[in-house]
Amino acid sequence: MAERSLRGRSIGAKSLESENGVPLADRKKIVYVCPKGHRTIVPFAAQATVPTTWFCHCGLTCVQEDRQGDPLEGGKAKRSHYDMLLERRTEKELQELLARKIEEHEMGGLSDYD
Ligand SMILES: [Zn+2]
């Protein structure tokens, strides 16, 4: 019994099965890009149906790189930089900010971004 045990092998160690002679399935790599510009490359089997969107590590939904101009599933259009800005500030806030910045500029200096 002792001679047959696999001493020194940890759980999760490499499989004892060999991959020699096992043909790998043909693959294709699909590149997805999120609105922040992160690229995610996902390998799929050549015959697999590829999803049009994927999830980026930043939490946003990314679309296939060569389909970036297409609207996203569910009719949700791709967000522009202005769309993202409007998620953080209202147009009224932006007008107030612009007026304050113009005033500061005319007074001779701009403060840091706020
Ligand atoms: Zn991202």
Image: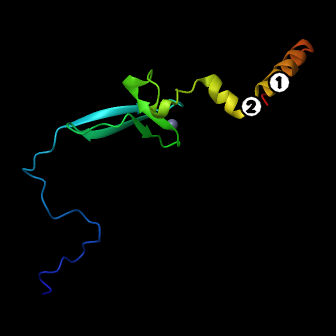
Q: Can residue 110 be seen by looking at this rendering?
A: no
**Image quadrant containing the N terminus:** bottom left
In percent of width and height, residue 70 lies at: 43, 23
Residue tagged by mark 2? Answer: 89
Q: Residues within 10 Å of mark 2 (few under 14, many from 20)?
A: few
Look at label 1 and name its amino acid. Answer: Leu
Depth-wise, is mark 2 or mark 1 nearer the camera? 2
> Would you say the beta carbon of the disc 2 residue lies within 8 angstroms of ligand 1?
no
- Quarter of the rendering containing residue 45: top left
The residue closer to the viewer here, 5 or 56, is 56
Q: Left or right: 32 with respect to 89?
A: left
Residue at 86% in and 18% down: 99
Asked whether disc 2 touches disc 1, contact meaning CB atoms under 8 Å apart, the reply is yes
Q: Name the outermost residue toward the front.
A: 75
Q: Residue at x 52, y 27 (%)?
A: 77
| Residue farthest toward the bottom in the current orientation of the protein | 1
Looking at the picture, the colour scheme in use is rainbow
Q: Quadrant of the C terminus?
A: top right
Which one is nearer the viewer's eye here, 97 or 13? 97
Tell which circle, 2 or 1, labels the residue nearer the N-terminal end: 2
Q: Position of residue 56 (x, y in %)?
A: 47, 40
Please indicate whether residue 100 sits to the left or right of residue 3 in the image. Answer: right
Q: Is residue 90 placed above or below 21 in the rendered structure?
A: above
Q: Position of residue 106 (x, y in %)?
A: 90, 12
Tell me the tag on residue 97: 1
User: At x 39% / y 26%, what residue is drawn?
Assistant: 65
Residue type of the residue flagged with mark 2: Arg
